Image: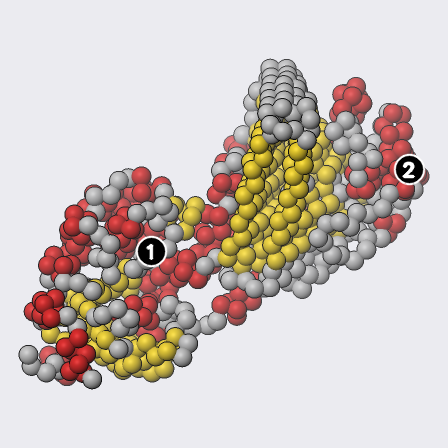
Amino acid sequence: MSKPLNSAERLEERGAMSEALLDVRGLTARVGDREVLRGIDLVVPAGEVHAIMGPNGSGKSSFAHVLAGRPGYELLGGEVRFLGRDLLSLAPEERAREGLFLGFQYPVEIPGVNNAYLLRAALNAARRHRGQPEVDAFDFLNLVRSKMQLMRMDESFLSRGVNEGFSGGEKKRNEILQMLVLEPKLAVLDETDSGLDIDALKIVAAGVESLRSPERGIVLVTHYQRLLDHVKPDRVHVLARGRILRSGGPELALELEKRGYDWLLDEAA
Amino acid sequence: MSTPDTQLDALLSRGYQHGFVTDIESDTVPPGLDAATVTFISRKKKEPQFLLDWRLRALERWFTMREPHWAKLRYTPIDYQGISYYSAPKAKADAPKSLSEVDPKLLATYEKLGVPLHERARLAGVAVDAVFDSVSVATTFKDRLAKAGVIFCPFSEAVQSHPELIEQYLGSVVPYADNYFAALNSAVFTDGSFVYIPKGVRCPMELSTYFRINAAKTGQFERTLIIADEGSYVSYLEGCTAPMRDENQLHAAVVELVALDDAQIKYSTVQNWYPGDENGVGGIYNFVTKRGECRGRNSKISWTQVETGSAITWKYPSCILRGENSVGEFYSVAVTNNHQQADTGTKMIHLGANTRSTIVSKGISAGHAQNTYRGLVKVMPGAKGARNFTQCDSLLLGANCGAHTVPYIETKNRDAIVEHEASTSRISEEQLFYCLQRGVSQEDAVNMIVSGFCKTVFRELPMEFAVEAQNLLAVSLEGAVG
């Protein structure tokens, strides 16, 4: 396996700075006194699906959270450009309205808040931000119903509380449903495949696939190869000890599946 | 990223949105309280002798009582002799015969408050007995209600037209000696609402009264009496806002409900009086006695309240479950922000066999506010098979507020089943971030989460009230993020 180019080199190779949807350089962050991101470089051009793999505690979820602006992380350095804008200067809700979607690993329950209500509020917040008229209840229902069919979700999900009493698999499907309705420019899915049985995995994968388009980017954070059997990544990155240790094509994921992560960690050490 | 605290401060500092004062010449008595004041009020209202006598007995009793201080409330002492006990829009030679004769400023006030008078009332299907300061100025839908035999009128009018009902029922649920504020109210009340639903009648519309405190330094002492005769049903809505004030205004209302055999009364309140500014200056003192008696078999009384206003709230809408199989319900959302204090809850007194009660209380506290649920469930020896279920949930927004739950349970009957559940939580950072990540603003996210927390109470409110309640909640909690 050839030594990977770093992100900047890859971009220069393509001579296409402008087509980067997401451009992360030297991103460093800590929680308390623990440095969880130690200089992450990553470029996701529009139209591509990237997988970020790595062992537990490697910083994958931290990376996803820092991109989305979750409080509790102290940024120490680096830069993130999203569609040419300085992502880190935006509030979390502004990042979302600009088209950044985070699929949560553990979607939180919000008792009493209607699932459809939150989703419509989210959609309309983004539409207002883009200067578009809000969708009315009727149009919204039509839209969400069509996406629910794709996710094979029962209509009762609309009137239930957000993730309230949902099974693990239902929560993940609900995340993908939200993504499909919001149609983000960049979706970062944090271990959306974990806790899914094989049928649910296929449904989720089909949902993710349906979002793939030349103007969008998708970042799949995952432990396992199995999601990548259904959603073929353009690039695979290994994140460990707060850094991208290796990047490659889909074959890298297969190799990791066979050999685990230790050899990479040993090489990096 | 700005810190949650600065956002909190910025958003909490938004002013009270219903703060405006209507300038109307008041006919106000000088401050002070004695038998002469009480007699003045009674004469002004041309009351029968029995009522004046009752008021004077109440006053005499009040002089012997002390202001209660067992609630978890702190406030500067009230100077009862510094209050003016009567204020009315200046009487013209002839009382207004239609809305066109009503002071336009008054109508404009209603307009700002969104009171659905005349055409708007018809569209909304709501009859309004609007109390402006102390004198009722307009009552709508009298004809339609009259056809059904329903009496819905200002209290002072009922004293003239139905003195026998007043004499029979006034003070029969809340005696004048009940407590300090009830005694005060009994002596000096100026007006309020009266409702009588005859046997077997389902009141054809929801009855609504908007209260409003206006003239400076004038306490409001409303008196409301609702009687549901056998097999009848009524839903009554009470909502209020008040103009901005620097001085504290005392409000000590009494509400009495009587449900006879198989009758049902549903009483809903949205309370949005001026809560004082962000430093705790000003605001209404709301010391209210509300009690309903399920006097007949199979009768039912439901209290639903959304309390967002007032500097201080002292209020325990209660049910005396005397009739066999009678049912009492209390659904409450109490919101306190800045320096507001609320000590509120209910009393369910089980006297009859197989009586049932349900209590659902949602307390929300933000800023430096203190929010206390205080409730009593009492099961007397005769209340065989009595049941109670109580759920008290508190939600804290921010680190400087407090929530307290003080349940009293006394059962003197071994087959009674009394359940109490309580929880205290904060809006979690996770819930908030989840909403933000979906593009929802911090303010909307908090409102959404808090509304979700209150859902079990809101769904007990009549539809049009539920919308108002949600709006009030949003205004009351702007930006209060923990």
The foreground one among B179 and B313 is B179
Q: Within the image, what quadrant is residue B76 found in?
A: bottom right
Q: Which residue is mark 2?
A: B60
Q: Residue at x 33, y 56 (%)?
A: A107
> Which disc, if any, is residue A107?
1
The foreground one among B439 and B381 is B381
The colour scheme used to paint the residues is: secondary structure
Chain of the residue where label 2 is placed in the rendered structure: B
Q: Residue at x 60, y 27 (%)?
A: B415
Q: Residue B46, image x and y in percent?
A: 85, 29
- Which amino acid, mark 2? Glu
* Other-residue count near label 2 (Cα within 10 Å), few / some / many at <14 / 14–19 / ≥20: some
Is residue B128 shown above or below B343?
above
Q: Residue A144, image x and y in percent?
A: 27, 46
Is residue A9 shown above or below A147?
below
Q: Within the image, what quadrant is residue B77 found in?
A: bottom right
Both marks 1 and 2 on one chain: no
Label 2's element?
helix
Looking at the rendered image, the quarter that the N terminus of chain B falls into is bottom left
Q: Residue B318, image x and y in percent?
A: 67, 35
